[in-house]
Amino acid sequence: MSLEHFEEPVIEGVKHKTTLPAGSALVLEGGGTRGFFSAGVLDAFMDAGIMFPYIIGVSAGAANALSYISGQRGRNRVLVEKFVGRPQYLGYRNLIMYRSLFGYDYVFRTVPERFLFWDRGVFDETDIRFVIGVFDCVAGETIWFEKHDVKPGFDVVRASCSIPIVSRIVKYNGYRLLDGGVASPIPIEKSIADGNRSHIIVLTRNKGYEEPPFKHNVLMRFFYRKYPRLVDGVRRHHEAYNGQLRLCEQMAAEGKALIIRPREPLTMESTERDIAALLRLHDEGYEEGAKALNGIISLSGT
């Protein structure tokens, strides 16, 4: 396909100058459109030319990692500027027509195939491990996919981004899948289990935030009466989030992790469409990512 095919200026991927030593992990929380904070952090990492040998993400964290691994600095910011505000991307029209608040066919097919080039060549050539968490609605647990599972259409990443109630269940390889953040909102435990020693953790909530209990359990039971383990997973989501957050804080105190997160409490929800606010959040992420670079180098032992 010719690059002239795309309607937005093409951002070609650039190979990263340095891959940090084995045992260094990048852990990415989700958060819907709040995840554009993480996109800013990743742009700062690209400007520094650094790549991690291991990246794990759920939901928006996994989606943002696609442009980071493909070396397309600024691509996610263009998504905010040009696409998030469109009703095809996010809006109640999608919920009525397609039973999904986010227009996932538009986000993961139309945009990368028609509007905004995604450099799969650089993505495939980048020799790292990329792990994507997705919730198995039948088994009631997080299952993990790898970089080689990312194919055109992005079904695995799409599943990881699919929020219960406002998204359809994704059928993939015999599974029934939804949001990877249900049981593993901050996938630090999987990163530890995979043998990593140092962890750069990018959160989309400020210091001091605590996840409250889910308020719509009756609605969950109504929508997902065939999936009781999904209902239970969402009911216990706040316990998982707060427990994983405490583990991250403990590891940071022990010098095993570095946490990057927004400076101030966020008033926006995961479905925020205010473009100016999202761009400010992205740029705050860039600033925080840039400030963390020395700490990252020190923690990784390079």
Image: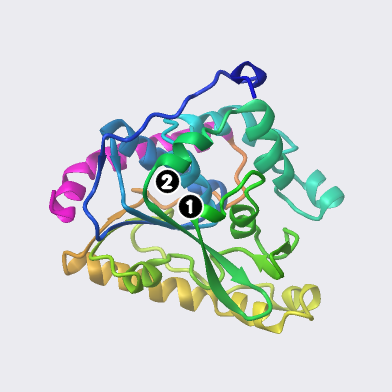
- Left/right of residue 50 with respect to residue 57 in the rendered view: left
Camera sees residue 130: yes
Mark 1, Cα crowd under 10 Å, few <14 / some 14-19 / many 20+, is many
Q: Tell me what residue is drawn at x 40 percent, y 70 percent.
A: 190
Residue farthest along the right direction in this orientation: 97
The secondary structure that most of the magenta stretch takes on is: helix
Work out whether residue 241 or residue 56 is closer to the camera in this orientation and state it.
56
Disc on res. 226? none
Marks 1/2 in contact by CB < 8 Å: the verdict is yes
- Left/right of residue 285 with respect to residue 274 in the rendered view: left
Mark 2, Cα crowd under 10 Å, few <14 / some 14-19 / many 20+, is many
Question: Which residue position holds label 1?
Answer: 61
- Left/right of residue 118 with respect to residue 163 in the rendered view: left
Q: Vertical placement of 119 versus 295: above or below?
A: above
Q: Vertical placement of 24 versus 111: above or below?
A: below
The magenta segment is: 275-302
